[in-house]
Image (cartoon, grey):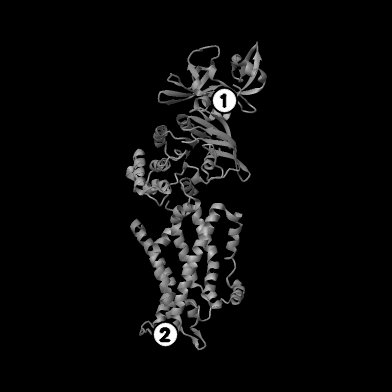
Amino acid sequence: MKISRKTKHYVENTLCYIALFLVLIFTIFPIVWMFLTSIKNEADILTIPPRIFFNPTLENYNFVFERSKFFRGLMNSLIVVFSVIAITLPIAMLAAYSFARFNVGGGQIQFYILTVRMFPPIAAIVPYFIIFRNMGLLDNILALIILNTIFNLPFTVWLLYGFFKEIPQDLEEAAMTEGSTRFEAFREIIVPLIAPALTVAAIFTALFTWNEFLFAFITTRTEAITVTRVMAGFYTERGILWGPLSACATLCIVPMFIFVLLIQKYIVRGLTFGAVR
Amino acid sequence: MGKVKVENLIKRFGKKIVVNNLNFEVKEGEHFCLLGPPGAGKTTTLRMIAGVEKPDEGNIYIDDVLVNDLPPKDRDVAMVFQSYALYPHKTVFENLAYPLRKLKLPESDIVKKVKETAEFLHIEHLLDKLPKHLSGGEKQRVAIGRAIIRSPKVYLLDEPLTNLDAKIRASMRTELKRLTKELKMTIIYATPDQIEAMSMADRIAIMNFGNLLQCDVPKFLYENPVDMFVAEFIGNYAMNFIDCTIIEKNGNVFLDAGDFIYNVSEYRELLEKFINSEVILGIRPEHISISKIKQSEDSIEAKVSLIEPISHRIIFHLAIGKHSITVNTHLIEANIGQNIWITFNKNKIHIFDKKTENAII
């Protein structure tokens, strides 16, 4: 049987889309399920087999807004995320630049920094808990900012290091022979070029910090709780409150979803950095 | 305009010595060329003069001021990088304006100066473009423009023509020469291309493996190379080298190449202490003449093995026994396989010591 080229192309395309569709269902299903659960009443949630048609309700959202500390958690999470970005980026930028240009520490310090990522954070949480208790920082967002900064720095430094390596050294040397100090050359020539990379670094830091649960769970109680910690509050003595938990989780996704949509083009630009030169 | 003096300059990268005890002086308004193959230390030397690389030893003077510890911005030099180093996020206008903004000139002066420079280099139509939209030749002009827009004491040009294709390179070479003569610039110019060096420079310093081998005016280097490396590096067609032994026979001094002997009694005084030792005869392709009949006692018979016509000249590849020789001559009828006579211009021959490769004559 002879298959024409057009038919073959058509079949290939169809198979491709089917595969993509399956992957899409696989990844998007939990999120859809979560959203559906958030607008079901308790009886519908626990029905087996699950009902396809049900009466949507907003009572779970009401529960979240009125009977949990969702807004405090949201506020805290936002404060922590922006503080961590504000502290991490400048430090990481300068550190990565000095590694890339001056080989500070001959590669040793770079490796030590990376070792922070080599053990699970839970291994360090007990010492940190004791340190923060002694400093009186328990249930304080400062503790969360410090911990998240510490654990985000290595990755950010390594990410930016790669980008700095991509920028030809000639550029800043040209700026220096043309009358700039090294710092001016850095600020006027290098930083604008590294901007897409900084955006990528900011996004990763934001996502990691926003989704962070362990530190929040261990070091916060009531005042400094974050959104992830608020969610954990729905595991109560009288069982897991599936409806409010799903509603809260759905609300948690929204800010990051909007954030990523807004800066999507920068992500692509950052990830394809260097390929366009 | 300024002058530059480099004294006992040494630079090591790890254990490797990339610039070894360099000494030279560049006069005001001189076009000075650092010529050498890749890895000779030319770029490193320029970078040390610019101040973006620190020398390990030695001193650099610009206008008699020791500048070793001055940052690049205080040295008043301009450098054109091999990669052009145009700022990718700035337009051509802003690229050109960058050095002026550092001088804190008023905006109206900056605009005026950029316009003038752009006109001078014929790039005024490119001012609003970003570097990535320029061709190689255009980028190169912008890079040069950024250097000449202010008047530094010294211009450092690092292989500015290397990245261009052959056709543009030739025309840019002419243009660059016109530019440097018009602006009376003090230039230190690094290039691996001897044609560029020979055609543009007032003086050439030949470098290899970080060492300065010879430094003189182009004509002198061509006529009196100090060793085999310089002899081979300078000249459009590589010099012929023939292994010989110096012998004495009947009161005359000869070069014995096995397949022929060549009388060099004229140079007896210089060659006397090398009698019976191995030497290398060097003769440029353009210093050999070809004829169908034997012209003189010194003529040697050779067989044509290949002919390359190049416009009004012909490159003959000849064989004398096991030796092969290249001759660059005017048009002459000859066929492959034919035997012809060649005569060396005896005033132009070079003889090198085989052990040290240094020139004896």
> Same chain for marks 1 and 2?
no
Give me the residue at 46% from left, 44% from top: B83
Q: Which mark is residue A66?
A: 2
Give the vertical position of A152 relative to A239 (above or below): above
Distance (Cα) linking label 1 and label 2: 96 Å
Give me the residue at 57% from left, 71% from top: A121
Mark 1: amino acid = Phe
**What residue occupies the far top of the structure in this picture?**
B250
Describe residue A4's horizontal placement relative to residue A78 as left or right.
Answer: left
Mark 2: amino acid = Glu
> Which picture quadrant has residue B185?
top left
Spot occupied by residue A153 in the image (x, y as percentages of width and height): 53, 64
Q: Are marks 1 and 2 in contact (CB under 8 Å)?
A: no
- Indicate the secondary structure of the residue bearing disc 1: strand
Spot occupied by residue B231 in the image (x, y as percentages of width and height): 55, 27
Locate the C terminus of chain B by quadrant.
top right
Describe residue B314's horizontal placement relative to residue A151 as left or right.
Answer: left
- Indicate the secondary structure of the residue bearing disc 2: helix
Front-most of residues B297 and B129:
B129
Spot occupied by residue B142 in the image (x, y as percentages of width and height): 39, 43
Residue picked out by circle 1: B241
Check the residue under mark 2 and report the chain it is in: A
Label 2: how many residues lie within 10 Å, few (<14), some (14-19) or many (20+)? few
Check the residue under mark 1 and report the chain it is in: B
Mark yes or no: residue A33 visible.
Answer: no
